[in-house]
Amino acid sequence: DKELEKVLKEINARLDEEGMITVYSSDYTKRELEFLSENGLIKTNYLYEFDYWKCMIVPTHKGENYFKDKKTRRIKKIIEWAKWLILLGVSIATLLVAICK
């Protein structure tokens, strides 16, 4: 989900600067933070006040490397497609050569 990736990118930028951050209920929805936490992208600790909550966030290795890993997966997928297309092209060329003889 692009919106959650945007949230993770914002949080990671702040974590890179500060190491640990505190966000408030007005910054992000609890659902967004819980989703990121459940998927191991951040670690959270909620503190509840009378009419709002705040959340202390610390980074995780998985969260810090999410975008780098995503780029690596995309490159691997492109390489696999390229290999498949090359094999398809060779097979078609071989077939055409065999038909023309």
Image (cartoon, grey):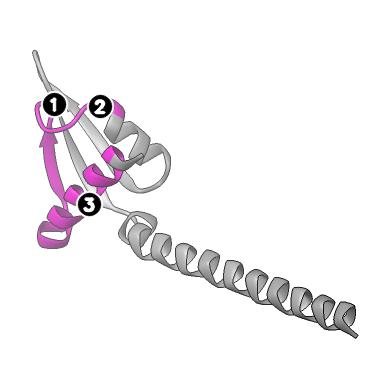
Q: Is residue 72 above or below residue 100?
A: above
Q: Is residue 86 left or right of residue 31?
A: right
**Residue picked out by circle 2:** 30
* Quarter of image, res 96: bottom right
Query: Do the CB atoms of the residues marked 1 and 2 lie less than 8 Å apart?
Result: yes
Q: Residue sitting at 36 percent across and 57 percent down?
A: 66
Query: Is-magenta flag for residue 2?
Result: no
Q: Residue furthest front?
A: 100
Left or right: residue 88 versus residue 51 is: right
Q: Of circles 3 and 2, which is in front?
A: 3
Callout 3: 10 Å neighbours few (<14), some, many (20+)? some
Secondary structure at numbered mark 3: helix
Measured from the top left, where is residue 52 in percent x and y?
11, 19
Q: CA distance from mark 3 to mark 2?
A: 17 Å
Residue occupying the far top of the picture: 51
Disc 1 marks which amino acid? Ser
Q: Main secondary structure of the magenta part?
A: helix
Question: Residue 45 at what x, y percent from top left?
Answer: 25, 36
The residue segment tinted magenta is 3-31
**In this rendering, which labeled residue sits more in front, label 1 or label 3?**
3
Real-space Cα distance between discs 1 and 2? 7 Å
State whether residue 8 is above or below residue 100.
Answer: above
